[in-house]
Image (cartoon, grey):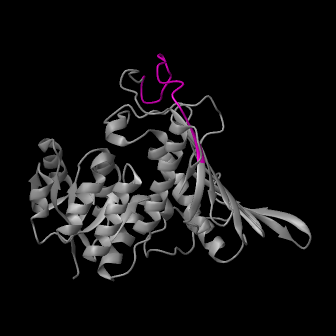
């Protein structure tokens, strides 16, 4: 195999913003089929990104019947991730599913089990792992720079950046708000850097404090309070089986100035690091404290061969396609994404019950 034939299911914002532009930059990939409930979206995507003769569908099951398609990218609202992914794996396709993996751990586990049962590759769209700063932090962790990492902060805080398009505000379709949307990236980066996927218990708080406000100064325009059914912010504290702890902070709307997205701070027995304004490393050397920020404009990368200035979406697409061609593991394993989903569900459940959630 020298070319990977890709079908896109869901031709909305994330497909146009990341998946299709990324795949277009990978010479080994060709997009041959596009599916969306709104046929005009699929037609537009096929015209802009597809090969000559690319097919258009409104029913994803018809797309899956095409045996020449090797890979499917699932770019739908969260509720549909699990069943479409399982169907695609059962149809003999490798699957890249956009984050979050699923709306709950039961649905996520179905995806993990389907991948094992079919022998097909499954990965989840945590493209922030491909950032140069995240790669550097991860490699420092692998080199033992931090020693035993026992504390981390997963931070995804916006002051006023509530997404008002699509179904982002619809709890039924999305399964939650900022925690499951952007908090999931920060949590994934933290777990990945720590290489710790064994949670023991957690507590969580979920707030609906600003949903009903108007004249909000939201960067995407005022939201409709009647449609804003998800939380505006959520916080959690997770204890892992080995005693390590992770603080999770997420918001779309919060009266705070120290805001940042897809950020992790890790602290270990030998040193620490963070993704605040690039990558920063700290520790003790010759009896003195040190900190430094590496120059990330040049240098090696662990998971792909290509231009270091490529977008994260292109890097993600390239390592994924090459994992298929070379029959190796993709950067994001389904079992890792399943753990992220477990923790997100645990925080939501703890907030709802007012009690500790045990895994």
Classified by dominant secondary structure, the portion drawn in magenta counts as loop
Residue 305, by quadrant, is bottom left
In this orientation, does residue 98 appear?
A: no
- Residue 73: x, y in percent? 27, 60
Disc count in the image?
Answer: 0
The N terminus lies in quadrant? bottom left
Indicate whether 49 appears above or below 176. Answer: below
Whether 354 is among the magenta residues is no
Which quadrant of the structure image shows residue 254? Answer: top right
Q: Residue at x 44, y 59 (%)?
A: 127
In the rendered image, which quarter is residue 317 located in? bottom left
Q: Residue at point 47% right, 16% down?
A: 214
Q: Give 65 or 43, whichever is nearer the viewer.
A: 65
Rendered view: 58 above or below 289: above
Q: In percent of the image, x 12 and y 59: which residue is there?
A: 63
Q: Which residues are magenta?
A: 203-222
From the viewer's perspective, tell me whether residue 141 is left or right of residue 101: right
| Residue 215 sits inside the magenta stretch | yes
| Of residues 52 and 193, the one drawn nearer to the viewer in this rendering | 193
Across and down, in percent, residue 280 comes to 70, 60
Spot the residue most to the right: 287
Asked whether the viewer can see residue 199, the reply is yes
Residue drawn 32% across and 57% down?
Answer: 19
- In this view, the residue in front, 47 or 93, is 93
328 with respect to 250 (left or right): left
Q: Position of residue 82 (x, y in %)?
A: 29, 55
Using residue 341 as the reference point, say whether residue 92 is left or right of it: left
| Residue 23 horizontal side relative to residue 186, left or right | left
């Amino acid at each position: 195999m020298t070319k990977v034939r890709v079908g896109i299911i869901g031709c909305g914002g994330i497909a146009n913003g990341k998946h299709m532009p990324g795949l277009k930059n990978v010479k080994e990939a060709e997009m041959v089929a596009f599916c969306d409930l709104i046929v005009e979206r699929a037609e537009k995507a096929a015209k802009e990104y597809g090969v000559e003769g690319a097919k258009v569908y409104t029913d994803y099951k018809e797309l899956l019947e095409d045996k020449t398609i090797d890979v499917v990218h699932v770019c739908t609202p969260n509720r549909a991730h699990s069943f479409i992914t399982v169907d695609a794996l059962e149809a003999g396709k490798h699957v890249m599913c956009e984050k979050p993996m699923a709306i709950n751990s039961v649905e996520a586990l179905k995806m993990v089990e389907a991948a094992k049962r079919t022998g097909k590759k499954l990965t989840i769209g945590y493209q922030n792992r491909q950032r140069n700063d995240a790669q550097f932090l991860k490699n420092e962790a692998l080199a033992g720079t931090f020693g035993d990492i026992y504390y981390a902060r997963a931070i995804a805080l916006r002051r006023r950046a509530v997404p008002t398009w699509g179904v982002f505000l619809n709890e039924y379709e999305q399964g939650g708000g900022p925690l499951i949307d952007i908090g999931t990236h920060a949590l994934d980066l933290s777990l990945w850097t720590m290489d710790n996927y064994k949670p023991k218990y957690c507590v969580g708080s979920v707030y609906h404090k600003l949903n009903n406000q108007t004249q909000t100064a939201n960067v995407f325009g005022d939201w409709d309070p009647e449609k804003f059914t998800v939380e505006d912010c959520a916080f959690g504290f997770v204890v892992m089986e080995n005693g390590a702890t992770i603080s999770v902070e997420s918001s779309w709307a919060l009266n705070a100035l120290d805001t940042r997205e897809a950020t992790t701070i890790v602290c270990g027995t030998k040193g620490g690091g963070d993704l605040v304004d690039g990558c920063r490393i700290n520790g003790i050397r010759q009896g003195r404290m040190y900190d430094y920020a590496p120059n990330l404009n040049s240098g090696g990368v662990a998971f792909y061969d290509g231009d270091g200035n490529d977008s994260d979406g292109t890097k993600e697409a390239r390592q994924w396609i090459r994992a298929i061609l070379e029959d190796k593991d993709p950067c994001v394993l389904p079992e890792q994404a399943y753990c992220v989903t477990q923790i997100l569900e645990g925080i939501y459940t703890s907030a709802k019950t007012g009690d500790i959630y045990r895994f």
